[in-house]
Image (cartoon, rainbow, N blue to C red):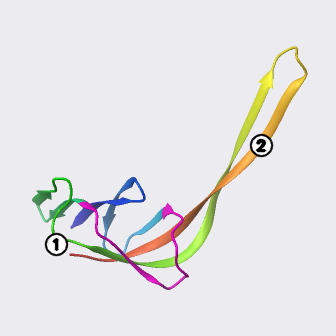
Amino acid sequence: MYAIVDIAGKQFKVAKDQYIYAPKMEGEAGASVSFDKVLLLDNDGSVDVGAPTVKGVKVSGKILEHVKGNKVIIFKKKRRKGYAVKNGHRQQFTKVQIESIG
């Protein structure tokens, strides 16, 4: 059994007892969260596709921790002009464990 869920504008395929790294959410570690925007639900071969969401289905999970992603280096340069800028960025994520679908 799995579902496709819209979390903060991004789509995730989730199953029970799975960990996902979603964009940073409000809430402390240990808090429970629920996602109402279920776009697709597969229950052992029977597929329910929402228009735009599946009615009456929720995905619940638990926030485990807030983490940072890998560093992305942004390097800009213009040749023969003496211009070079190096910046870095680390995106913040929330690690969520999916507890139930239904």
* Distance in Å between CA atoms under marks 1 and 2: 45 Å
Image position, residue 100 (x, y; %):
28, 78
With 59 as the anchor, is 75 left or right in this view?
right
Give the residue pinned by disc 1: 56
Give the residue pinned by disc 2: 87
Q: Residue at x 19, y 62 (%)?
A: 41
Quarter occupied by the C terminus: bottom left
Q: Residue at x 49, y 63 (%)?
A: 21
Specify the segment rendered in magenta.
22-38
Q: Residue at x 72, y 38 (%)?
A: 74
Is 28 above or below relative to 45?
below
Secondary structure type for disc 2: strand
With 14 as the anchor, is 78 left or right in this view?
right
Labels 1 and 2: the sequence-earlier one: 1
With 62 as the anchor, is 70 left or right in this view?
right
Q: Residue furthest right?
A: 82
